[in-house]
Image (cartoon, rainbow, N blue to C red):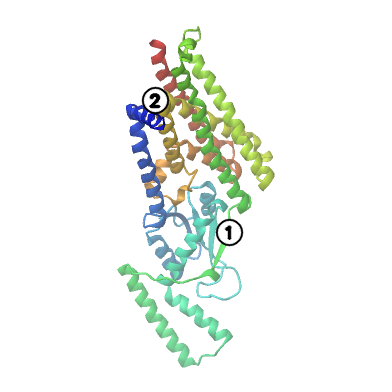
Amino acid sequence: MSGVVFRAMALGFARDRGALAMSLALPVAVFLVFAAIFAGASGEQLRVKIALADEVRSADTGRLARALARDPAVELAGQDLAPDAVRERVRAGTADVGVILRAGGRSLRDVGGFGRAPIVVVVDPVRAVAAQLVEGLLQKAYFGALPDVALSGVAGVLQDGFLTLTPEQEQELGTELGRLRDETLENERAGRTGQGAIESLVEREPVAGPSRARGQVAYYAGAIAVLFLLFSAVHGALSLLEERETGILDRLLAGPAGVAALVGGKLAFLVVQGTVQVTVIFVAAWLLYGVDLPGHLGPCLLVTVAASVSAAGLALALTAACATRRQAQAFANVSILILSALGGSMVPRFFMPPLLQKIGWATPNTWALEAYAAVFWRGQGPAQLLLPVGLLLVSGVAGTLVALCLARRHEAL
């Protein structure tokens, strides 16, 4: 009996060529997407967008700025900016991290002294990992492009706290540091670099907004909410295929309302279901982690409804395009995984190679996360919500129209 059941299922699976192809080909597509993401995050394709400001404009800060900009892991999102412009770009998300070589701080040669650090790393709390990467790049640039400055600072610390150099020794030290400086400039022209550590020279400055923990919770609340919003919308939209297979669809289409009423009713239910689902996630983030949901309730609800419309329209289009439930499940689930991976629901987008970051703008996940970012931790006004909310609504309407056109084929039959 078990053999008969196995044979029946195998024959059913083999005859459904669409489901067979999707079951074998689509997992490969998911693998390729994640392989590209993680290979880029750990290899040479990783690039951090940095906004750079040099208030000092000395020879030393110029050498450091050039070395940082020259690093293959850096993509400049602005150079020769004012400090406030750097902070604004980080706050708006057009730069992952800002670097300010500020006036009024210690000299780059003053490694262990008192006073303000000469380098400020401006960071969005949600992208704290990017700040750590940039601090490592600064370390590499400092010891690669300014070894004479670094050793001069160490010598100053030793002289002040442990020993006194004679005039001859100071002169010899200055000569050797000058020689090292000349060699470094030559290495710079030849493209050679070095590395080291400058923690005492760097100060981290978070952009205005919630605390780091709350910012990260708000980000992942939005990311997970959109991911499961898509899955639940597809699960609900599968009823369209169930009704087709059981004959219920034919009886519904025989009525006066036709297919438009059927698709419209499913759209309305999926939007309400998605809005409630996402709201529950943010309520949990508010109660357990202090995310300021009451202070942003109106804008958050607007984004949530728009994201629910987008997810519902996409789910209806995906399921209406498939001939069987098995095809729809395979195609929709894998499509959602790919959209969510590219859109930042699984991996922050700044970890991805530049090409995948650009492709991510075509996903509803990216626009929903950008809208939630504007609401919860960037402190932006309603004007910044118009574009992401508008695109989410347009994508939802477009998906619904596609589903309606595909469903009308059965109405015509």
Where is mark 2, residue-wise?
322
Residue 31 is at least partly visible in this image? yes
Q: Residues within 10 Å of mark 1 (few under 14, many from 20)?
A: some
Toward the viewer: 232 or 309?
232
Foreground pick, 299 / 264: 264
Asked if 246 appears above or below 163 in the picture, the reply is above
Specify the quadrant of the image occupied by residue 323: top left
Residue 114 drawn above or below residue 127: below
Q: Amino acid at mark 2?
A: Cys
Q: Is residue 378 visible in this depiction of the protein?
A: no
Instruction: Tell me residue 234's x, y (percent).
Output: 49, 30
**Label 1, on which residue?**
205
Residue at 46% of width from left, 68% of height from top? 139
Observer-nearest residue: 216 or 228? 228
User: Element type at marker 2?
Assistant: loop
Mark earlier in primary sequence (1, 2): 1
- Circle number at residue 90: none
Q: Is residue 368 above or below residue 37?
A: above
The residue sitting at the front extreme is 1
- Of tags 1 and 2, the one toward the viewer is 2
Which kind of residue does numbered mark 1 sit on?
A: Glu
In the rendered structure, the answer to whether residue 346 lies left or right of residue 116 reads left
Residue 330 in percent (x, y) is at: 41, 33
